[in-house]
Image: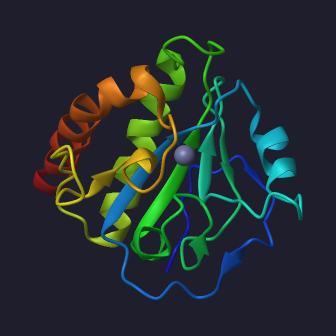
Amino acid sequence: MSNSPLVDYICLSPHMEAPREAKIDRITIHHMAGDLSVEVCGNIFQNPERRASSNYSVGTDGRVGMYVEEGNRSFCSSSPENDHRAVTIEVANDEFGGEWHVGDVALEKTIVLCVDICLRNGIKELVYTGDTTGNLTMHKWFRATACPGPYLSSKFPYIAEEVTRRIREKVEN
Ligand SMILES: [Zn+2]
């Protein structure tokens, strides 16, 4: 199993399970609930009191961090069942509270990262259904949390459509 060539910064977290117990067939996009750099996010995922991690993160500057290799299960979505199947991505906010806005640079890089994940893992389309029958999932479906926030939640249909459009473009060319 490969990792993304888009990664700018690596800080592997001890909070994971190796290897994951299922084939990657979905993506879960989270928000950081803060404007954290990929370095600060990586530091939090070293904290033994948090026992949290994600496979990747995207900063407001568009840089990508990796904390758990794709072959392993992150502790991200409060659902082992989801995280064994999912590549998890933490995206930085450029607004604290409110809509938990995400900047355009981070949003675009998240889409590019999702396309890369799908192409390398043989996922032919990213489907948002509003529940777990699709393969783009939200943290708030697995526990009581605001994640991924109102703004990013509203972008899930767009992200899914855009990722699928770009996968088809690459496969056809
Ligand atoms: Zn989350």
Snapshot colouring? rainbow
Pick the front one: 59 or 28: 28
Q: Is residue 7 left or right of residue 172?
A: right
Q: Residue at x 79, y 56 (%)?
A: 45
Q: Quadrant of residue 155?
A: top left
Q: Where residue 146 sits: x, y (%)?
A: 50, 34
Q: Where residue 120 sits: x, y (%)?
A: 37, 67
Q: Residue at x 38, y 56 (%)?
A: 27
- In this view, 163 is above or below 99: below
Pick the front one: 54 or 114: 54
Q: Residue at x 41, y 22 (%)?
A: 150
Residue at the limit of the structure toward the front, as seen here = 144
Q: Is residue 167 left or right of residue 18?
A: left
Q: Quadrant of residue 85?
A: bottom left
Q: Where residue 130 sits: x, y (%)?
A: 20, 43
- In this view, 110 is above or below 103: below
Q: Where residue 173 sits: x, y (%)?
A: 15, 50
Q: Quadrant of residue 58?
A: top right
Q: Is residue 157 left or right of residue 149?
A: left
Pick the front one: 109 or 48: 48
Q: Is residue 9 left or right of residue 70?
A: right
Q: Residue at x 29, y 51 (%)?
A: 136
- In this view, 97 is above or below 45: above
